[in-house]
Image (spheres, rainbow, N blue to C red):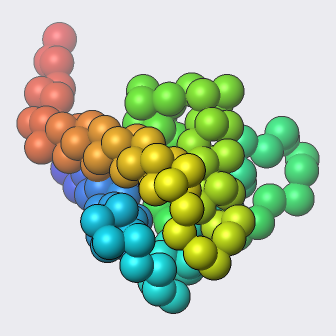
Amino acid sequence: MIAGNSEIRSRYLALALDARRIMDALLPFIESAHRDECLDASVKEAIDALNAISESPGATAVHSNLAFSEYEQVQTLDEIKNQQERKSVIDDLEQIASSPEAEPQQIEAAMRVLRFFFALESRALQHYNRPPAIPAYS
């Protein structure tokens, strides 16, 4: 049972770390409109990951390197925004990726995406830090 708790906790930690990695790529763009390869790669990964978990069953999903596919990770994403609400996050990410030049609308979209991933990181860390349930003995 302890190994199961450790595995579950590691999934929450992986989710928090991936959310932080995306936020770290967004911050320079928001602060100085500086675009780099890290931003472009992170935005593409986030789009692919969010699309993959939003696809209907049986659809050909794009594989993502982000930790968004395990049960606990999807549940945590749903706690922040449900599948329908995540479409707005995907739209914002696509807007950021749409032009090589930083535009005011892209900065605003990046701020909304940053808030989403901050909330996701915070919730994943709450789950990670939660003590394991004590088994009931009859």
Q: Can you say whether 13 is above or below 99 in the image?
A: above
Residue at the spot 18% in from the left edge and 38% down from the top edge: 126
User: Which of the 4 image quarters holds residue 30?
Assistant: bottom left
Q: Position of residue 89 (x, y in %)?
A: 57, 43
Q: Position of residue 12 (x, y in %)?
A: 31, 51
Q: Quadrant of the C terminus?
A: top left
Would you say 32 lies left or right of 109 here? left
Residue under the point 63% across and 78% down: 100
Q: Which residue shows up at 47% across the image and 80% down it? A: 35
Residue 14 appears in the picture as rendered: no
Identify whether 75 is placed above or below 12: above
The furthest residue to the top? 138
The answer to whether residue 137 of the structure is visible from this angle is: yes
**Along the horizontal axis of the image, is 40 left or right of 121?**
right
From the viewer's side, name the closer residue of 122 and 43.
Answer: 43
Q: Position of residue 45 (x, y in %)?
A: 59, 69
Q: Residue at x 30, y 55 (%)?
A: 16
- Residue that lies at the very extreme toward the bottom in this rendered image: 37
Question: Residue 78's x, y, as percent?
Answer: 50, 30
How many numbered discs sit on the rendered protein? Answer: 0
Residue 44: image quadrant is bottom right
In the rendered image, which quarter is residue 106 located in? bottom right
- The quadrant the N terminus occupies is top left
